[in-house]
Image: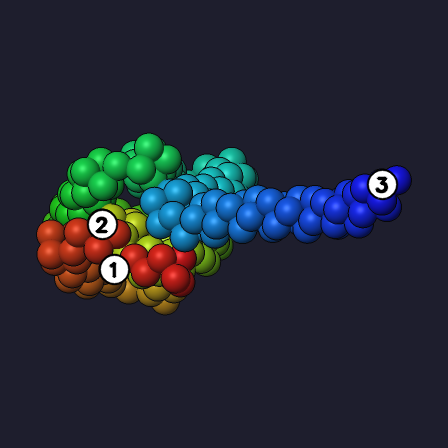
Amino acid sequence: MNGGPEAKPAIHLHEHEHPHDHHHDHKGHDDGHRHGHTHGLVDPTIVRSRAGVRSVSMSLGVLTATALVQVLIYVLSGSVALLADLIHNFGDALTAIPLGIAFFIRSFRAEKLAGLAVVLAIFVSACVALYESVQRLIHPEHLSHLWALALAGLVGFAGNELAAQVRLRAGRRLASPALIADGNHARVDGFVSLGVIVSAVIVALGLERGDPVIGIAITLVILKITWDSWRTVSRTEPGALVDPATS
């Protein structure tokens, strides 16, 4: 009879300790959950990959919309000069695709190669602009539909500059020399479009020789950007400056 009452406090003590142990286990589970969640947030390769794909996609969308507006202007005007610039812009916009793939597969080597390809594309743009400018200087051509050229140039400059800002900001934040080079590439196309506006104004004033002169000046700017982009891509490794705390 005396053993019975003494057993109850022992049982009560055990019941009290069990919830305490359960709470401790639950806390340990929470700690493990928080640790895994934090680890996912600071993984620089995953965060960098998603941010890179997002910036490339946004800029490509901007350039696609810009090209579609220029297509509409071309349909309304039928300008051959505008058609050539339109084809050029469509081709340059496609350089973002290899870069987007490199970010998606999280390959620094592929990103490096994409950056070199972008630099090559900028250099080719300079060569084409120089060739066309010299040809027009030797064999002057009468430009028609000046209003369409000026409007398309304005649209092209705005679209390319917006795409350039998206790529350059993301490139600096993610320490991606390829993305910075592609931003410079978009900026080059914006300068070309700006040159189209200036050429249209100069030709409208009766100075047809001013068109190829503007083209040569733009070529020099493109060559300078080509050199800067080459130095950026060749001297900086992709992701070399990524700070997980700020990613």
Q: Residue at x 75, y 46 (%)?
A: 10
**Circle 2/circle 1 CB separation < 8 Å:** no
Q: Residue at x 66, y 44 (%)?
A: 22
What is the spatial separation of the Cα atoms under label 3 and label 2, in whole angstroms? 75 Å
Dot 3: element: helix
Q: Position of residue 219 (x, y in %)?
A: 18, 57
Residue furthest right as drawn: 1
Q: Position of residue 222 (x, y in %)?
A: 20, 57
The residue to which callout 2 is attached is 238
Q: Residue at x 31, y 37 (%)?
A: 106
What is the spatial separation of the Cα atoms under label 1 and label 3, in whole angstroms? 72 Å
- Residue 4 is marked as 3
Horizontal placement of 7 versus 102: left or right?
A: right
The 10 Å Cα crowd at callout 2, few under 14, some 14 to 19, many 20 or more, is: many
Quadrant housing residue 84: top left
Residue furthest front as drawn: 1
The 10 Å Cα crowd at callout 1, few under 14, some 14 to 19, many 20 or more, is: few
What is the spatial separation of the Cα atoms under label 2 and label 1, in whole angstroms? 8 Å
Question: 112 or 122: nearer the eye?
Answer: 112
Question: 143 or 49: nearer the eye?
Answer: 49
